[in-house]
């Protein structure tokens, strides 16, 4: 069964600090996809990144970067020079590629990030 | 704006009642997913439809049902409502193909059962 663990329930940082949100996953599949979503106080879920299990290259997008390590089953998310607008709940999710056209995505419990000015 | 629309935004109803939540996917997306977000259960996958057919089921109660219509919009029906059904219900859509793609979420419907 697929499972996603986000051990950090809440994190509070001061603006301009770097922060890393941890995500550990469990799956028996060799092919799977990992995602990060952001849920700001307004409530919508915003897609941030998708990564498949065959691509371990780290990705950087502006102040955001992701570190995918299959050896430790982790897909961590780092925000560099955090800003108040980064305050949100961040979710990591996993989808196993057992069937085409079937994307049963399982979410972690989320990490609430508060960035203080 | 994700391109996924959901109506209504808020819904307040009484226990025992039945409600229908509506979702229109992004243009071109054939798959629609429904999720429930509550404080105690987190974000849970309920059900997926692909081009009108049920494709996957998650933790969906028997009192809940969904369907996807020929125009690809979807409805989630919740009946015999209980206080514990109060939650934020999200609809999401995605393209499909030979790999798994990201899902784009609507703004959600906040259901309050009193």
Image: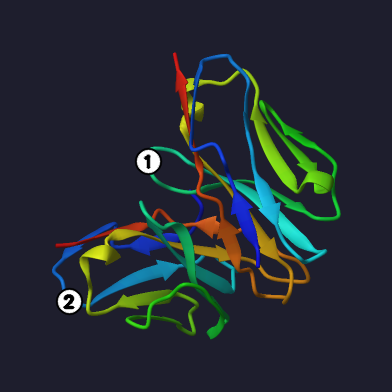
Residue at image position (60%, 63%) is: A105
Number of numbered callouts drawn: 2
Q: Position of residue B62 (x, y in %)?
A: 37, 83
Determine whether B14 is above or below A23 in the image: below
Viewport quadrant of the N terminus of chain A: bottom right
Which chain is disc 1 placed on?
A
Relative placement, left or right, of B45 versus A20 is left
Which residue, given by chain and number where applicable, does mark 2 sit on? B17
From where the camera sits, is residue A45 visible?
yes
Name the element at disc 2.
loop
Name the element at disc 1.
loop
Q: Quadrant of residue B31?
A: bottom right
Q: Position of residue A46 (x, y in %)?
A: 53, 46
Mark 2: few/some/many CA within 10 Å (<14, 14-19, 20+):
few
Viewport quadrant of the C terminus of chain A: top left
Which residue, given by chain and number where applicable, does mark 1 sit on? A42
Find the distance from the CA under tag 1 to the CA under tag 2. 28 Å
| Colouring mode (rainbow / by chain / secondary structure / one colour) | rainbow
Which chain is disc 2 placed on?
B
Q: Quadrant of residue B82?
A: bottom left
Residue at image position (47%, 29%) is: A87
Q: Position of residue B18 (x, y in %)?
A: 22, 78
Mark 1: few/some/many CA within 10 Å (<14, 14-19, 20+):
few
């Amino acid at each position: 069964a697929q499972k996603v663990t986000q051990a950090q329930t809440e994190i509070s940082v001061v603006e301009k600090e770097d922060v890393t949100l941890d995500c550990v996953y469990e799956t028996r599949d060799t092919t799977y996809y990992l995602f990060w979503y952001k849920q700001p106080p307004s409530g919508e879920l915003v897609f941030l990144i998708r990564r498949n299990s065959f691509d371990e290259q780290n990705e950087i997008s502006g102040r955001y970067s992701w570190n995918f390590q299959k050896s430790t089953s982790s897909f961590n998310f780092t925000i560099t020079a955090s800003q108040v607008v980064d305050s949100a709940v961040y979710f990591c999710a996993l989808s196993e590629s057992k069937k085409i056209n079937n994307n049963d995505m399982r979410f972690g419990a989320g990490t609430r990030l508060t960035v203080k000015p | 704006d994700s391109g996924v629309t959901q109506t209504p935004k808020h819904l307040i109803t009484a226990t025992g009642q039945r409600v229908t939540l509506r979702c229109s996917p992004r243009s071109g997306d054939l798959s629609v997913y429904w999720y429930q977000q509550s404080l105690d259960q987190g974000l849970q996958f309920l059900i997926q439809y692909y081009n009108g057919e049920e494709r996957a089921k998650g933790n969906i109660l028997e009192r809940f049902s969904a369907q996807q219509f020929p125009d690809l919009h979807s409805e989630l029906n919740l009946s015999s409502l209980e206080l514990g059904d109060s939650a934020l219900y999200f609809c999401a859509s995605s393209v499909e193909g030979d790999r798994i793609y990201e899902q784009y979420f609507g703004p959600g419907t906040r259901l309050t059962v009193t």
